Image (cartoon, helix red, strand yellow):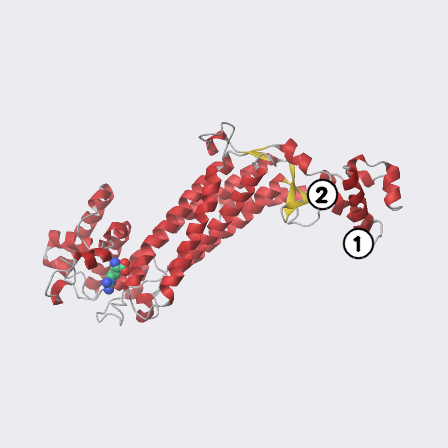
Amino acid sequence: MTLWSGRFDTAPDPAAFDFGISFGFDRALFEDDVTGSIAWAEALAAAGVLSAADATSIVNALREILEQGRRDPAWVAGPDEDVHSFVERQLVDRVGDAGRRLHTGRSRNEQVSLDLRLYLRRRIGLLQQAVVKVVAACADQAEQAGAAMMPSYTHLRRAQPVLVAHFFLSHASAIRRDYGRLVTAANEADALTLGSGAIAGTSYGVDTSLLARKLGFSRVVSNSMDASSDRDFVASFLYSVSLGMVHLSRMAEDLIIFTGEEYGFFDLADASATGSSMMPQKKNPDPLELVRGKTGRAIGRLTGWLATMKGLPGGYNKDLQEDKETVFDAEKTYAVSLAATHAVVSRLSVNAERSGRAASGLLLATDVADYLVSRGMPFRRAHEVVGAMVRRLLAEGRDFSVMSMAEWREASEMFGDDAPQAATALASVQARRTPQSTNPDAVRAALNACRAWVASPS
Ligand code: ARG
């Protein structure tokens, strides 16, 4: 029995009907569906549409249903078309005709949007907590790294020395922004759809503002036609998940590279790696690779959803039912990826000797040029002078640290006795002056700011 069998002569063809059944996945909305229905029953009673007695028996039965579903999630199952039909069937089983009055003035079109909005507002909070944990793990690594140094890269070629802490805080900075995007997605879901009816609005005097407040919404949708087809909040959520995954993926890629034999700046904990069935020496960064791989899947959910929405005519269309598996999959993908990233990052160790060694040598060329600039040489000229030094050192397989004073002077009269000291990784980071730089004091302040954010994220 469906909620709409009245106008049909025959039972539906399973090939068509079963295809449209969503209960297998929209049962995740059970809690939200019941919550919304309790509020709707109270609103109908307040509007004089339901008697106080009917409203009481409906609300009590719905509370019972909610309790039972929470106690035994496997009970939320059956031949029903969707979760809304399941809840209504359970209600009618318990309270008969009173239960048949609950759907007065309401449509599943607004109901399903309400449920998904309630669901997302609940679940986004959990994702945000997981995001904060990853940022905290980056901050812990930054703290533990202390004065350790590593090269930074542009074009994946050695660029300039940075503190290892600066590297970890760079990823923390990006991931912190993801928290803000989740806030935006939650705000977008923050509008009550009840009162929209199937599309034209409802003809009962329901106080939608009160209903919104009761369900924790700060506003009511502004147009019933728009509301029945609007899934922008789904797209915003999928976008925030996608970009969040992109950031996890980029950190994963950095860590895959920097924990590999060729770099060896960091070591993956044994607990964060897997072995090979054939090559005994292998220690593979599978969790990081999976985070990178699953990012494609999250982006696919976003682009897939935009494609689903783009051709829809106004009002509700069944295509919109695709929103749920999309949201649930993106949410799960992000949640497991955040957990895996947290696990890997928090157990990572820094190989300061090796990363520090890689942070010296010819990547100090900019600092040598800056030295000449500090003596009055125009930067373009200094760039040329140092470029010539680099060319020669490269040919001889040497670097700045082994040059004699005579060689410095030969390169330029302007090099004083203190020139060799300028060409060290420590001098290089200390020479940075801006708050966003890798200057050790600036990094310490950034770490404190990051810690403060973790304590009170926004
Ligand atoms: N299962 C449907 C969905 O997810 C519920 C809304 C059904 N509305 C309708 N007019 N068939 O979108």
Q: Earlier in the sequence, mark 1 or mark 2?
A: 2
- Extreme top residue here? 280
In the rendered image, which quarter is residue 52 located in? bottom left
Local secondary structure at mark 2: helix
Regarding ligand 1, which quadrant of the image does it lie in? bottom left
Nearest the eye: 328 or 98: 328
Judged left or right of residue 369, residue 329 is left
**Residue 306 horizontal/vertical position (percent):** 40, 62
Label 1, label 2: how far apart the Cα atoms are: 17 Å
Residue under the point 18% across and 49% down: 78
- Camera-near label (1 vs 2) is 2
**Residue 134 horizontal/vertical position (percent):** 48, 42
Judged left or right of residue 314, residue 386 is right
**Residue 6 horizontal/vertical position (percent):** 12, 65
Give the number of the disc on residue 379: 1
Residue under the point 40% across and 45% down: 335
**Residue 380 horizontal/vertical position (percent):** 79, 55
Nearest the eye: 185 or 285: 285
Nearest the eye: 367 or 40: 367
Judged left or right of residue 328, residue 142 is right
| Crowding near the residue tagged with mark 2, few <14, some 14–19, many ≥20 C-alpha atoms within 10 Å | many
- Extreme front residue here? 278
In the rendered image, which quarter is residue 104 located in? bottom left
Residue 402 visible in this rendered orientation of the protein = yes
Give the number of the disc on residue 363: 2
The amino acid pointed to by label 1 is: Phe
Residue under the point 79% across and 51% down: 383
In the rendered image, which quarter is residue 355 located in? top right
Q: Is residue 284 above or below residue 13?
A: above
Q: Would you say the beta carbon of the disc 1 residue lies within 8 angstroms of ligand 1?
A: no
